[in-house]
Amino acid sequence: MIGDVMTTTLNLEIEEYTNRLLGVIKEMFGLKNKSEALNKLADMCGEEFLEKKVKEEFVKDIIASSNAHIKKYGMRKMTIKELDKLSGVDE
């Protein structure tokens, strides 16, 4: 963990174009390495795909929905036959 940011170590195989792109980003922003360049790219483009932080309202809604489901159905498990019927496989 760096500061309050959790980190993950990866060993990646990337295409030549991706490597060149990370090199350009590294130089453009005066970054130390391509790892920082990848983080910068994620900061610049990532929110198109994923919000940085989950909104508290969303979490509360999911918890309420889960609790309502458990209250209605309990902790009952679905059989394979029920799952097949629900997914349309058993038609």
Image: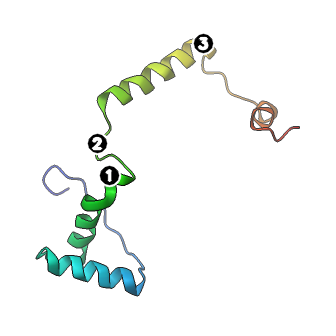
Q: Earlier in the sequence, mark 2 or mark 3?
A: 2
For the residues marked 2 and 3, what is the alpha-carbon distance in whole angstroms? Answer: 30 Å
Residue for badge 2 = 53
Query: In terms of secondary structure, where does tag 1 sit?
Result: helix
Mark 3 packing: few (<14 Cα in 10 Å), some, or many (20+)? few
Quarter-of-image position of residue 69: top right
Foreground: 69 or 50? 50
Query: From this viewpoint, is residue 33 visible?
Result: no
Label 2: how many Cα within 10 Å (few below 14, some 14–19, many 20+):
few
Q: Say which residue appears at 55% left-offset and 12% top-offset.
A: 71
Q: Is the residue 12 above or below the residue 40 in the image?
A: below
Front residue of 58/10: it is: 58
Residue 88 % position (x, y): 80, 38
Of callouts 1 and 3, which one flags the residue occurring earlier in the amino acid sequence?
Answer: 1
13 is higher (above) or lower (below) than 58: below
Nearest the camera: 79 or 45? 45
CA separation, marks 1 and 3? 36 Å
Which percent across, then down, holds residue 13? 42, 79
Q: Residue at x 22, y 76 (%)?
A: 25
- Neighbor class of circle 1 (other Cα within 10 Å; few <14, some 14-19, many 20+) is few
Residue ID for mark 1: 47
